Amino acid sequence: MERGATATEREGEWARHWQYAGVPGLDLLRARYVRHTFPRHSHEGFVLAAIRRGVEDLHMPDGTISVMPGSVVMINPEVPHSAHAGIPEGWSYGTLYPSKELVADVASEITTLRGTAGFAETIVHDPDTARLVHEVHLAAEAGNALAADSVLRIAIARMLSRHGRSLPARGPLPAAARTAALAREILADRMTSPPSLEALAHELGTSPFALLRAFKAAYGMPPHTWLTNARVRRAQHLLSAGTTPADAALAVGFTDQPHLNRHFTRIVGVPPGAYRRERARTYKTQGPAPS
């Protein structure tokens, strides 16, 4: 191990979360986790993940799934989930985060799905597609844009053809869901100085516990958890634009950089400094992650 390696690397954990200029609209994560636990969170785009070794316990709204090698996980945008190791040895995996626009582009070309395309299942046993997920990583790390983009689209097309569905269209919301949506807007607008639960409920003309129930029913997590997730998401955009972690922490409402570090690392899987460095690198100098 190199001098100056992080404590996580010394413990056998490592992670690389990055973008490849050759494939716009895609984030990539390749990692090995042992003790790391992902708290309840959601993503703006899609998640396609394939385990290489070990077992990941993935907690979805409808139950817990043990993800093993040969399986592919498909998570639609804004679906709350959490995860941790399913065995003491942990798990290593490759994850692709294609944007909603990228998936919609593939769906419009190869499916007859109407509206917003997504996935009907969370996990399938599909070793061939799992290999494609890893091949996207290898091609991107080798700087092969043609292969990375081609294999990515083949993988998305295969999963949509076999497991795709039209996601529910957003219609008129019932009263409780409208209250939750308004609460979310307020929290997003006042991210740096959010109101207390009681003040928020009073502003919306409801009670604290009624607001808690409505918010969790609508978004799968209580308001304070949603706010932490939203702050980390906004910090990701700021770090990608070159903002320092210290400035990003204050801009999204964390009290200081250590608070950002803790929440960002738990949700994203890498520290904010590493996340920013990967995006600042020139793609020509990016090498492969550990195997």
Image (cartoon, grey):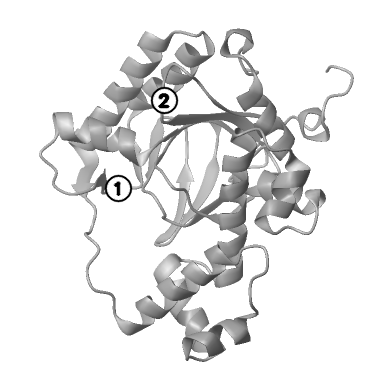
Report how far apart the C-alphas of labels 1 and 2 lie in the structure: 26 Å
- Pick whichever, 83 or 65, lies toward us: 83
Q: Is residue 1 above or below residue 98?
A: above
Q: Is residue 52 visible?
A: no
Q: Position of residue 18 (x, y in %)?
A: 57, 27
Q: Position of residue 225 (x, y in %)?
A: 59, 65
Q: Residue 4 shows which numbered tag?
A: none
106 left or right of 124? Answer: left
Q: Amino acid at mark 1?
A: Glu
**The quarter of the displayed image where residue 86 is located:** top right
Secondary structure type for disc 2: loop
- Pick whichever, 129 or 286, lies toward us: 286
Q: Is residue 197 above or below residue 96?
A: below
14 left or right of 50? Answer: right
Asked whether the beta carbons under mark 1 and mark 2 sit within 8 Å of each other, the answer is no
- Pick whichever, 71 or 283, lies toward us: 283
**Which class describes the residues within 10 Å of circle 2: few (<14), some (14-19), or many (20+)?**
few
Q: Position of residue 129 (x, y in %)?
A: 33, 26
- Residue position for label 2: 24
- Pick whichever, 195 or 212, lies toward us: 195
Q: Is residue 43 visible?
A: yes
Which residue is located at x 48 percent, y 85 percent? Answer: 204
Secondary structure type for disc 1: loop
Q: Is residue 53 above or below residue 64?
A: above
**Nearer-N-terminus badge (1/2):** 2
Which residue is located at x 29 percent, y 80 percent? Answer: 174
The quarter in which the N terminus is drawn is top right
Which dot, 1 or 2, sits closer to the camera? 2
274 left or right of 198? Answer: right
Q: Position of residue 139 (x, y in %)?
A: 45, 12
- Residue position for label 1: 121
Which residue is located at x 89 percent, y 19 percent? Answer: 3
